[in-house]
Image (cartoon, grey):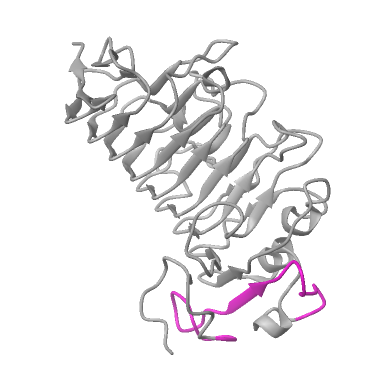
Amino acid sequence: MGLTRFPHGISSFGVPVFGSGFGWKKESTTYFVDGTDGGDQNNGKSPDWAFATVQQALSTANAYDVIYILENSFSDTDPATYKGTAANHTIAVANTGLAIIGVSHAGQIGYPMTPYLMGMDATETPIFTVNAPLVAIENIHFSGGWANASTATAGIYAPNSTGTTSAVPQALSIYNCSFEDLEGATPQSLTGTGGNGGISIVGTWYVVINHCRFRNCVAGITLISNVSTSVATTMEHCVFYADDDTDVAADISTYCQGTSDILVNDMYFAHRCPAYAAGGPARYVSMVGSEEGLITNCHLGNEATLTTGDNGTGMLAPNGVGWGSNYCFAALMADAG
């Protein structure tokens, strides 16, 4: 059986293609990671010869290669196999076009069906730091760890490592992933520095975040920069949960002067309005700066009277952002100009 629709993962029919020769380019190599039965002494080029760790696959892969991470068993107190024994994972600039895809037989997002990556370092670092352009990450669950929540700053962090207007990690695609207990020590700063929560992006261009789930993240998605603009960021079809609204500063927070073409569409916020105990944006959506874009078809599921607009109590954004068909507890939300 051939694989006819790539990327978007392998979800129900196993792995039909083995070894080298499959990927974005004809010279691409496919690697496999199996934390239960793999070994880092293997060549990683088939499920039978899979690596044991994600880090070994990242260290071996080159530009436009593909890494499949098989479903894994895990221990909350010993996540070294999938986190990496020395540090969390960095996708280097040289790994242009790398695809990292979790294999989920049930096609579901989140535990227990997708590969589970934890951040359990003593100091707060992202689980994945993306420094390369054209990277695709799909079907993976990112967790700060149940017993040691807050030890991971972010699930996926894409910094502008060059500090230029056109940032290196362009065209990042994050699809069908879930993020949990990525609480961090503080909410995302509104000064354009740092990064925490589920996904934190610093001034990159042409990012797509689609069909993701966020639970107990101090910020679900942050798009922020004090050194560059952000262009054409699309966020669609995501769900946000929280056990306690005081754990969340903002589900979506942006601070990028001159940012344009932001689309926030069809989002479901399933908890009460964020009210982070130590301050922060405290909105479902908080956009600060000169953003232009559209927020549409979003549903705030546990509030009844919040508003949208440049003075919005539920979703805050400048006048350059358009609004359309957003709902608050089944009622059409009012715009606060």
Whether residue 268 sits left or right of residue 219 in the image: it is left
- Taken as a whole, is the magenta stretch helix, strand or loop? loop
Q: Residue at x 48, y 49 (%)?
A: 169
Asked if residue 203 shows in the view, the reply is: no
Q: Position of residue 329 (x, y in %)?
A: 29, 24
Q: Which residues are magenta?
A: 18-42
Asked where in the image residue 42 lies, by quadrant, the reply is bottom right
Task: Check if residue 334 falls in the magenta segment.
Answer: no
In which quadrant of the rendered image does the C terminus lie?
A: top left
Which image quarter holds the N terminus? bottom left
Q: Residue 199: give x, y in percent of width and height.
A: 51, 40
Q: Nearer the viewer, residue 214 or 29?
A: 214
Count of numbered circles on the image: 0
Identify which residue is drawn at 80% across, 54% down.
80
Look at the picture and state if 148 lies above or below 20. Answer: above
Where residue 116 sits: x, y (%)?
65, 54
Let me know if residue 22 is in the magenta part.
yes
- Residue 11: give x, y in percent of width and height: 48, 70
- Could you tell me which residue is drawn at 76 percent across and 34 percent down? 148
In this rendering, the answer to whether 329 lies above or below 145 is above
Q: Please state which of residues 277 and 7 is positioned toward the viewer in this rendering.
A: 277
